[in-house]
Amino acid sequence: MSELTLLVLRFGFLLLLWMFVFAIVYALRSDLFGSPVHRLRKKKNGSDVFASAAPVQAPITPSGGALPMAVGLASTGPASKLVITSGASTGTELALDATPVTIGRSSDSTLVILDEFTSTQHAQLVPKGSDWMLQDLDSTNGTKLAGTPVTEPVLVPLNTPISIGKTTFELRA
């Protein structure tokens, strides 16, 4: 082989090596610092609007029926706290106010769940009047409301189990 061919092969392998190094650094950065946060609200004429284009549907139980108190946009009553009912932090309570609650592994989350089945930014609870809406943030393992996977924003009735990874919690008055 000529020296020019060997030189080109060396630079090619060196370039390939650096591409692998950058891929590893990118993967480590996203694991350590998290992925970008998905925005749930967008500005429309200067006011916040919930970013769901689809109508909100009542959660369906595994047997196929709608959950009680979750018919259409029926009021579930004002929830004042979020209570973890099972998982590593069982019994922990989080007071709710008018701000959205982000749930995930990230230290930036309002409710941090240290679980290998929880994404960095897993789900979000958003107040809508006196009710709360639950939205999955494109998590890897999904979010369940009363055992049903959440694919779009849904109204959360009081005392209904929400499962993220190995942790279950409920909204309570």
Image (spheres, grey):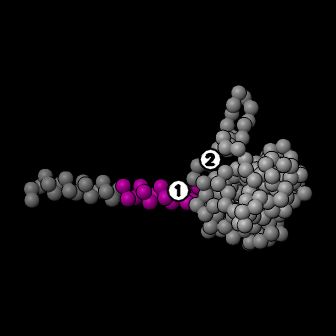
Question: Which circle's residue, 2 or 1, is located before the other in the chain?
Answer: 1
Q: Which residues are magenta?
A: 19-34
Spot occupied by residue 68 in the image (x, y as percentages of width and height): 83, 59
- Marker disc for residue 147: none
Which of the pair 159/137 is nearer the observer? 159
Mark 1 is surrounded, within 10 Å at the Cα level, by few (under 14), some (14 to 19) or many (20 or more) other residues, namely few
Q: Mark 1: which amino acid?
A: Arg
Task: Residue under label 2, please give it.
Answer: 38
Name which residue lies at 84% across and 62% down: 159
Please say whether residue 139 is visible from this viewpoint. yes
The magenta stretch spans residue 16? no
User: In the rendered image, which quarter contains the C terminus?
Assistant: bottom right
Q: Are marks 2 and 1 in contact (CB under 8 Å)?
A: no
Residue drawn 58% across the image and 49% down it: 36
Amino acid under disc 2: His
* SS type, badge 1: helix
Q: Is residue 39 above or below residue 60?
A: above
* Whether residue 125 can be seen here: no
Q: Which residue corresponds to mark 1?
A: 29
Q: Secondary structure at mark 2?
A: loop
The alpha-carbon separation of the residues under discs 2 and 1 comes to 18 Å
Q: Residue at x 66, y 67 (%)?
A: 165
Q: Nearer the viewer, residue 112 or 75?
A: 75
Name which quarter of the figure residue 80 lies in: bottom right
Q: Nearer the viewer, mark 2 or mark 1?
A: 2
Q: Quadrant of the N terminus?
A: bottom left
Q: Main secondary structure of the magenta part?
A: helix
